[in-house]
Image: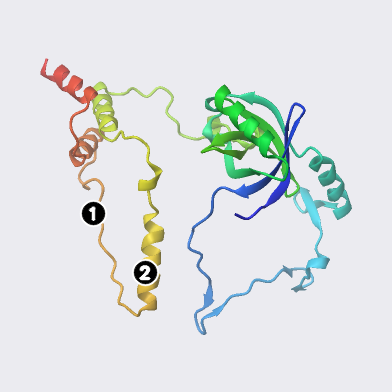
Amino acid sequence: MHTIWKGSISFGLVNIPVKLHAATEDKDVKLRQLHKECNTPINYKKICPVCDREVKNEEIVKAYEYAKNKFVILDEEDLETIKKENEEKAVEILEFVKLEEIDPIYFQRSYFLSPDTGGMKAYALLRQALKESGKIGVAKITIRSKEQLAIVRVYEDTLLMETIYYPDEVRSAKDVPNIPSEEKVVQKELETALMLIDQLTVKFDPEKYHDDYRTALLELIEKKKAGETVTAKEKEPAIPPDMTDLMSALEASLKKVKKKPSGRKRKTQEKKEA
């Protein structure tokens, strides 16, 4: 597994040398853009619209746009100074909290942490302490010149670090338009919706979920490579087009779910019979 960062985790006076590895990978099928006339891949160049020519990397500087077409240019020396000041902190666990206290909207990316030379004992100590306390560590880390908030927790006997957004990076739910405040819910519709939830409730098993689009795309690519003729399959609508009201849609959804009646369903049926 490729190491993308080396440093240390500290909590209190304990220091653990660690390596950072990406815990997830993007499996999107990358498609190239070709010139239709000759099937040549399209190249993208950095063009200055004022000078009307291609710009080389050494001619490019970084800047912050504080107003329309007004910039503050930042020298590499300035950025390097800030980078060094923050890198000295490495991964410092600031405090410990319960995982359920953090809403999933804050979570960003996941990384596996492995012990580096001389860090086995301290790594095992932190792992066991987190397991027995039921807590996670809140830490700060600088990755690729960006200081990020993160949490450290145990995942299948491995320490896992997950970067999380700062509060000012999460948009307010109050700004979302057209959210009903106190919409009156019809009791019968609510009971039917609860029945549907009960029917579809299972123990979470990530192995049974697959990217159907990616699978279909790869199959299409293989067929094209083999010179086969491709015909699109017609997909049945999830709900019949004449289902215009909410209750009809809920009842139609229940009919599609073939499971034994759950506890809530039996109770609702008994209420209806009564």
Quadrant of the drawing holding the C terminus: top left
Question: Of residues 226 and 247, which is closer to you in this image?
Answer: 226
Figure check: 63 above or below 140: below
Q: Mark 2 or mark 1: which is in front?
A: 2
Label 1 packing within 10 angstroms: few (<14), some (14-19), many (20+): few
Going 82% across and 59% down the picture, which residue do you hit? 61
Write down the quadrant of residue 187 in the picture: top left
Q: Amino acid at mark 2?
A: Leu
Figure check: 218 above or below 229: above
Image coordinates for residue 112, horizontal then vertical, percent:
60, 44
Image coordinates for residue 88, horizontal then vertical, percent:
82, 40
Q: Amino acid at mark 1?
A: Glu
SS category of the residue bearing label 1 = loop
SS category of the residue bearing label 2 = helix
Residue 85 in view, yes or no = yes
Residue located beneath label 1 in the image: 236
Residue located beneath label 2 in the image: 220
